[in-house]
Amino acid sequence: MEAKAAGQYLNGMLARQDAQRRGFGYAILLDTQGFVAEGSTESIFIVRDGRLMTACLGTVLDSITRRSLLELAEAEGMPTFEGRIPVSLLDDADEIFFSSTPIKLLPVRRCGQRVLSGVPGTITKRLMNRVEEILQGRDRRFSSWMAAVD
């Protein structure tokens, strides 16, 4: 679960193919104990009552994007939680989004039969905007994330 190589992506790719056959764009994978873990090749974040939540390490890939979003949330004063997330929280979430290097943040509009309203939500949109500012070099707090390229 903590490595991209040696078939880790294969499991996620198979899950995405299964999700697409069922009419969904992405899959949500569970850990070995039945808690929300991650997307097929993305981290998953849930927002509930203004709190940003994601699965704990040991059950998911410790990706740079995941770490960066948690660091950004902390810098923005957003409460965060890393731990076991019951599947039922997907039904109670105010916002859900996936994140990875290529997609940055991808708001979830539908999860199972549930359609989320106001997508992207306030927190997701705020994080999306902040990430764009960082990537464009307009937020000096995160200049250490950038490397000069000639």
Image (spheres, rainbow, N blue to C red):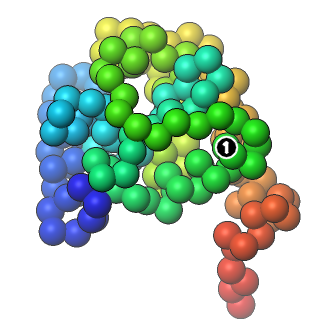
Q: Where is residue 44, by image quadrant?
A: top left
Q: Residue furthest bottom?
A: 150
Q: Position of residue 38 (x, y in %)?
A: 33, 41
Residue 20 visible? The answer is no
Q: Quadrant of the C terminus?
A: bottom right
Vertical position of residue 116 compared to residue 53: above or below: above
Q: Residue at x 59, y 37 (%)?
A: 80
The image position of residue 116, as x and y in percent, is 50, 13
Specify the quadrant of the image occupied by residue 110: top left
The disc labelled 1 sits on which kind of residue?
A: Ala
* Residue 27, x across and y down, in percent: 27, 34
Mark 1 secondary-structure assignment: helix
Q: Residues within 10 Å of mark 1 (few under 14, many from 20)?
A: some
Residue drawn at (70%, 36%), measured in percent from left and top?
Answer: 78
- In the image: residue 34, left or right of residue 109: left
Residue 92 at x, y percent in the picture: 45, 11
Residue at the image position 71 percent from the left and 60 percent from the top: 135
Q: Nearer the viewer, residue 104 or 70?
A: 70
Q: Mark 1 = which residue? A: 73
The answer to whether residue 56 is above or below residue 116 is below
Could you tell me if residue 144 is visible in this image? Answer: yes
Is residue 150 shown left or right of residue 83? right
Q: Nearer the viewer, residue 28 or 48?
A: 48
Q: Residue at x 78, y 53 (%)?
A: 133
Q: Quadrant of the N terminus?
A: bottom left
The mark tally for this picture is: 1
55 horizontally vs 94: left or right: left
Q: Nearer the viewer, residue 69 or 24?
A: 69
Identify whether 9 is placed above or below 112: below
